[in-house]
Image (cartoon, grey):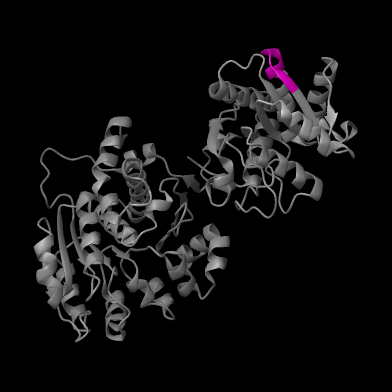
Amino acid sequence: MRVVTAAEMRQIDQTAIKQHGIPGIVLMENAGLRVVEVIEGILGDVRDQVFSIIVGKGNNGGDGLVVARHLLNRGAQVKVLLMADPADFQGDARVNLNIWQNMGQPVYQVNQVNGINIIKVALLNTSMVIDALYGTGFHGVVNEKVGRIIELINDSHIPVVAVDIPSGLEADTGQVNGPCIKADHTVTFGLPKIGLVVEPGASYTGQLHIVDISLPRALTEAGHLQKYLLTGETVARWLPPRQSTGHKGTYGRVLVVAGSRGMVGAARLTTRGTLRAGAGLVTLALPAGLQPVAAASLDEAMSLALPETPEGTLAIGAAGVILETCRQVDVLALGPGLSTHPETAAMVKSLLPELEVPTVLDADALNALVGDVDMLGEAKAPLIITPHPGEMARLLDLQVAEVQENRIDLALAAARKWRVVVVLKGARTIVASPNGNIYINPTGNPGMATGGSGDALTGIIAGLLGQGLNPEQAAAAGVYLHGRAGDLAAEQLGQVSLLAGDIISFLPDVFKELENSFVPVR
């Protein structure tokens, strides 16, 4: 499903109006009706329920006035609370305000001196608040009075449905710079906006309902819209079917190079993730002293001893063995638990220009490139990098806060500059491709913030690469599957006790879920 900026959504609306001849008042009517349908899905019969609708002067307020009319016609009691003088309403919003007043219905102007008291009284007897104050054009900070009203609504614990976007939330960034409506449900029109599906905006959105308001499909699926919200249906279409004549070589030979003294667990988790993702043959290559330990705990994988330093990390001589082994595999996963030992880092840098198989670079393979990150753009092999925000900050020579404030743009810029697929991990992981495609992952939970979770993800992506998905698909599908497995694990085990190994253990349930829920399109 595509995700849009506020400007892209405005362009879609204007094209629908001007080129397709759909009047704006029709789009507004459809929007309001869809919100009412969602409300009925939440509350059931709305007859005799009491609604307070906070209305701004723009099109978002016009949508709210349509909601008010249809709720009233269904037998609800409706209070329309205006945050602007009626004379300031224009266009389609003005039409709907006129309709409301021509129906003999009052409006309450909370923009006036006693507005706060009007809000307080309204909230004493309200079943649900409808937020139709600011739309997708909002940015910055709400004024002091609006901020006080938002705080009163949030503190009331009355269910809130936001129309298109919670007021106070920036549609293009998801940033919240002051008071913002904390919605229980948000009904957004046509396509989700970026701010609704990235943090911190996603935490203010509540349950997101994406509704059709009769925008032509050619506009909402236009090729120039290159941002996507990952869905199970999309991932199911990408996953390759298992052939009746397939064998272990059919589904990919993957070499995992990982581990060091004290970090053998990272190597094992990466290997297990690769196996559970469906790879046919997996070999774990690690320092020679650790090979017996790893082999004893990985029945389904082969193992390979590599030259090591006295400290139990990979020596420079490991590069030649790895390159020779890569002649016999389809995919390489490199980095988890390697350590930042200078000789190991030098080995990684000597290896990178020589690689010819698709490679997933994670953790210490990325740390080895700090200061020499442009080497990525010179690599012959297709690369996927999977930095967490701290690693991304080191690669870009930025502060972590700078990365977190601009995740999408930085991930895309890095993907284009280095010609790699970037997986910027974290809440709502971002996957960026050099061709400009962006994927936002909605799966996952805080319980996955545990050691080894990233190692499991590296293995999952490598396993998907081995089965023939291209790097962009493997990365995007991998983060979805990883997050969904974490969600299923949290449902069964809770978030506090969740371990990285649990994520891997629930992967089969995710694959079964996708197989049973979606019919792949081949």
Can residue 4 be seen here? The reply is: no
In the rendering, at what x and y percent does residue 235 appear? 35, 42
Give above or below for 43 relative to 293: above
Q: Which sits in the foreground, 210 or 185?
A: 185
In the rendering, at what x and y percent does residue 63 appear? 71, 29
> In percent of the image, x 41 and y 65: which residue is there?
387
Task: Give the extent of the magenta segment.
Answer: 71-78
Q: Residue 360 falls in which quadrant of the image?
A: bottom left
Q: Which sits in the foreground, 195 or 240?
A: 195
Q: Is residue 12 magenta?
A: no
Q: Which sits in the foreground, 482 or 334?
A: 482
Q: Is residue 73 magenta?
A: yes
Q: Residue 88 falls in which quadrant of the image?
A: top right
In the rendering, at what x and y percent does residue 199 appear? 54, 52
Give above or below for 256 relative to 52: below
> In percent of the image, x 30 and y 83: which residue is there?
341
Can residue 290 be seen here? The reply is: yes
Quarter of the image where the C terminus is located? top left
In the rendering, at what x and y percent does residue 382 appear? 33, 63
Give above or below for 374 relative to 516: below
> In percent of the image, x 32 and y 56: which residue is there?
457
**Could you tell whether 234 is left or right of 46 in the image?**
left
